[in-house]
């Protein structure tokens, strides 16, 4: 048990070292919702690699993290901004936008339209499909 705890603590320390770079990149806004003035947390895109990687992390609000962890709580109309995020320069944002749109497209045509119009690299789509939202 102590080894698991130590490994978790080391991972958290490594992730927290990314904090300033992520906050700067995110301009202190949630990278998926654009919400500002709320506490932001570092979110690792699953599946998480053995060692934390900055390129697989996002700064997200607690509300967004809760929705990603419990996709049934996603309210599709709150995610219409994904149409812009799918074109982000940040690959991690694109991956999560693709995952969210794929999930929402089960019920909403507008989400599928965005996916159909997006020119996404096959590797990015493969990465997004590695661990879809369920």
Image (cartoon, rainbow, N blue to C red):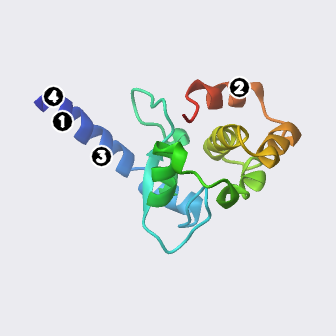
Could you say where residue 110 lies in the image, as x and y percent from the top left? 81, 48
Whichever of labels 2 and 1 marks the residue nearer the N terminus, that label is 1
Q: CA distance from mark 4 to mark 1?
A: 5 Å
Whichever of labels 3 and 2 marks the residue nearer the N terminus, that label is 3
Q: CA distance from mark 3 to mark 2?
A: 29 Å
Please, is residue 38 above or below residue 53 in the view?
A: below
Please, is residue 99 above or below residue 88 in the view?
A: above
Could you say where residue 83 lies in the image, as x and y percent from the top left? 78, 52
- Disc 3 is placed on an element classified as helix
Q: Quadrant of residue 24?
A: bottom right
Q: Quadrant of residue 105?
A: top right
Question: For mark 4, what is the residue?
Answer: 3
Q: Nearer the viewer's eye, disc 4 or disc 3? A: 4
Identity of the residue furthest to the left in this view: 2
Whichever of labels 4 and 3 marks the residue nearer the N terminus, that label is 4
Mark identifier at residue 110: none
Identity of the residue furthest to the bottom in this view: 37
Labelled pair 4, 1 in contact (Cβ < 8 Å): yes
Q: CA distance from mark 4 to mark 3?
A: 15 Å
Labelled pair 3, 1 in contact (Cβ < 8 Å): no
Question: For mark 2, what is the residue?
Answer: 123
């Amino acid at each position: 048990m102590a080894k698991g705890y130590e490994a978790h603590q080391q991972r958290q320390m490594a992730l927290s070292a990314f904090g300033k770079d992520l906050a700067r990149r995110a301009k202190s806004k949630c990278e998926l919702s654009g919400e500002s003035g709320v506490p932001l947390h570092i979110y690792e895109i699953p599946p998480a690699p053995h060692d934390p990687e900055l390129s697989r992390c996002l700064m997200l609000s607690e509300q967004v993290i809760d929705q990603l962890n419990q996709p049934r709580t996603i309210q599709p109309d709150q995610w219409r901004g994904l149409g812009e995020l799918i074109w982000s320069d940040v690959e991690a944002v694109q991956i999560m936008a693709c995952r969210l749109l794929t999930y929402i497209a089960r019920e909403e045509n507008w989400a599928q339209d965005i996916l159909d119009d997006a020119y996404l690299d096959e590797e990015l789509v493969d990465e997004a499909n590695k661990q879809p939202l369920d």
